[in-house]
Amino acid sequence: MDPRVIASTSGVDIVLGRVQKHPTNPLFGEDYFAIPSRPWETRFDNVYPSVVLDPDSGLFRVWYFSFLTDSDMADIPLAERPSRTYGSPAREDGLLYAESRDGITWFKPELGLIGFQGGTANNIVMSTESHGIHSGGVLLDEHETDPARRYKAVFRNRRDRTMAVSFSADGLDWSQPVPWAQYSAVGDTHTNGFWDASRKSYVVVTRGWTDSTPDNPYIGERIVLRTESEDFLNWTEPREVLRGADEHDQIYSMPIARYADLYIGLPAVFHKGEPNASDWDLVDTELAISLDTEKWSRVAPGTPLIPRGHGSYPTGAYDCGCIYASAPIVIDDQIFLYYGGSNGTHNGFRESSLNLATLPLDRWAGYCAGPSLGFITTTALVLDPHTFSLNVATSETGSIRAAILTETGSALNGFEFDDCAPITGDGLRLSISWSRELAELPNTPVRLRFELRDATVFAINGATRATT
């Protein structure tokens, strides 16, 4: 996907990788009507999951969003909801916590931290009453040297309508919110971020509106704002970094993460306009990339990275309505994409849950050719002959060949297409060979040119961009 690696293409299209949804989805859902009941889980709404793998405990940990009180969800039984209209009544927000040893089976502990209906036997770590929180996100900061600030949260404080941060040593017991020293944002969604070692700063994305004003911030269309900070307290002015095409293509939220030399975004695309459209009032999660976190582009606009399930409320799949992802987690040869899924429209009744989709390593997207030959030529690369291989997939009748060119594009004897043994199959690290050995290459940057038919190239292993 890195545009700095690709010099030219012909006869190929960029396609998204194919995720696999875990067979045990949903991993957990709202337990308001469960036995025993968790009455503070009336509506997960968009879930907004923040999932991390704690290197110290080995636990998967998730912080997720719930309406602790919501009269429509509490008073209208599941069987009656299809015939009723959801009214968005007065409600209180909460940040809830769960953990897992394997990432599949989750446990909701009774933490004894936050009061709810006269007791503390719940898994609430923040509420509007206790911390003023309105949605938001959590990050595990391995860069932090102060143990009391190892976990960080950034969110909209509903009490005074400003952005705020909070700190915790264990991710459970959180400090009172610290308002941003300067600036603010609408921020009423999955605000999230990470420590970017290359920039030596925290980068956070949140929500804005195209025509927002101080008196009425919710005007226009939803957009993504970006801000950064060296200390997680003093933030730069939030500036727009991504917007959709129109009212029917609004960017609702976008979890972000560093991935290799790129930044990955998972924009939730809200289809608000065009009431007669088949996807009206639904939300898709797509894929976006950036080279610097300041300019973002959607890789395949209109194509979901995590497809919604089939059907519609109330009989459709658990994720047929709206999908909101957490930042990716890489474990061995897999990318874990946890996401909140719901079975109804954004503005209607829906029941939501935490779910998991996975991608093979580095298979966010690839260049694909059909029955006709396609070609890809790279920019100058430095190859490691010991680790050089390809992350590719071919059909039963498809194949890939590669040629190695000089930095200026001239053919190299013994490394042309006719010298290459065709690659077939599906693998993350398929070897490639020519009539000459890679060790015989001159110690200078080279270019690669691929010829493919009924095949997809996802990644080149053992190659780095040549510096100039």
Image (cartoon, grey):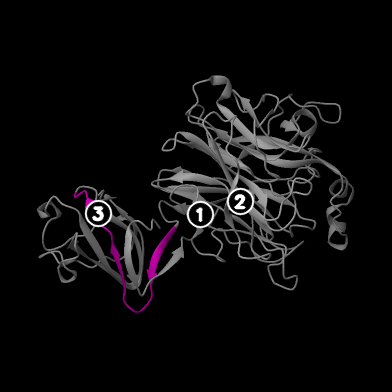
Can you tell which of label 3 and label 1 is closer to the viewer? 1
Residue pointed to by mark 3: 381
Callout 2: SS: strand
Indicate the amino acid at tag 3: Leu
Indicate the amino acid at tag 2: Val
Q: Residues within 10 Å of mark 1 (few under 14, many from 20)?
A: some
Q: Position of residue 384 (x, y in %)?
A: 21, 48
Q: Residues within 10 Å of mark 2 (few under 14, many from 20)?
A: many
Q: Which residues are magenta?
A: 365-385
Q: Earlier in the sequence, mark 1 or mark 2?
A: 2
Callout 1: SS: strand
Left or right? Give the position of 362 relative to 153: left
Residue pointed to by mark 2: 224
Residue pointed to by mark 1: 296
Marks 1 & 2, CB-CB < 8 Å contact: yes
Q: Quadrant of residue 232?
A: top right
Q: Earlier in the sequence, mark 3 or mark 1?
A: 1
Above or below residue 183? Residue 420 is below
